[in-house]
Image (spheres, rainbow, N blue to C red):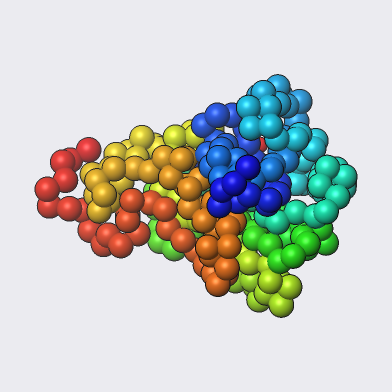
Amino acid sequence: AGGLLAGKRGLVLGVANNRSIAWGIARSAAQHGAELAFTYQGDALKKRVEPLAKELNAKVVGHCDVTDPASIDAVFAATADVFPGGIDFVVHCIAFSDKDELTGRYIETSEGNFTKSLLISCYSFTAIAQRAEKIMRDGGSLLTLTYYGAEKWMPHYNVMGVAKAALEASVRYLAADMGPKQIRVNAISAGPIKTLAASGIGDFRYILKWNEYNAPLRRTVTIEEVGETAAYLFSDMSKGVTGEVLHVDAGYHVVGMKHPDAPDI
Ligand code: NAD
């Protein structure tokens, strides 16, 4: 099949269900002609991910919990089996923090949850880059997902804001490390979208409304819109782009203050 991503092969980590940003990205990539492999986290999600993978003719390469390095090795080995010629892109849509600490004050963060949140939401991208580098054939594109709470204080985002700031910094360091091999490393900073992970964030409806009323486009974004930007970052159209954090947020990141016409929430 023809298309922007014809002949490209990619690994997608982080599909939980059909609301996942990873699913929006996978669907766009497939529509543009890419061949895909999916991972899932645990048996509960396996049942959700398998039918979704089937819809896109994607392979399922197994369980991956990023806190278990052996499971990361296993899915990369399985990906190399499925795509013996190598892969062209990997997308990391994984984050976690204890829900009880995504509300109230950041200062209350425990050491245990700080460490776990940074491990799952930040270090895992580097762990994945290490494995991806070995099976990318002719350059490649690595992508992760971040949020504006990395750049500015946002209510309830707390330790996740700190983890995303570290993730965005790691995008820059990985871009420099992998650049000589023509492997590009970028992040999409997505506006708020109602997903399973987002439901753990305190008062998420308020954040959605605030964005809808104040973003330049006066609305929130969809997983399809994030998916289309991801397809661009996987494609040769973005061959000169690396180390970038690209906002797909209806322009919200340029706003400094509530719009005078915006209704109260
Ligand atoms: P989601 O719940 O659909 O996806 C989160 C995924 O993380 C799930 O598939 C889950 O299995 C996976 N995950 C969590 N812990 C893991 C572990 N230990 N090992 C392997 N996988 C693990 O939610 P989403 O909103 O699509 O989240 C995807 C990414 O997008 C996250 O990085 C999130 O921070 C980011 N993001 C989300 C929003 C939003 O508003 N939804 C905005 C900006 C960025």
Residue toward you, 232 or 226: 232
Residue 94 x/y as whole percent: 63, 45
Left or right of 75: which side holds 224?
A: left
- The answer to whether 51 is drawn above or below residue 237 in the figure is above
Q: How many marks?
A: 0
Residue 138 x/y as whole percent: 74, 65
Query: Residue at the front extreme?
Result: 2
Q: Residue at x 69, y 32 (%)?
A: 57
Residue toward you, 144 or 55: 55
Q: Looking at the rendering, which quadrant does residue 220 occupy?
A: top left
Q: Residue at x 50, y 45 (%)?
A: 227
Tell me, yes or no, if residue 102 can be seen here.
no
Residue 113 x/y as whole percent: 64, 48
Residue toward you, 13 or 232: 232
- The answer to whether 40 is drawn above or below residue 127 in the figure is above
Q: For ligand 1, give the image quadrant.
A: top right
Q: Residue at x 68, y 52 (%)?
A: 8
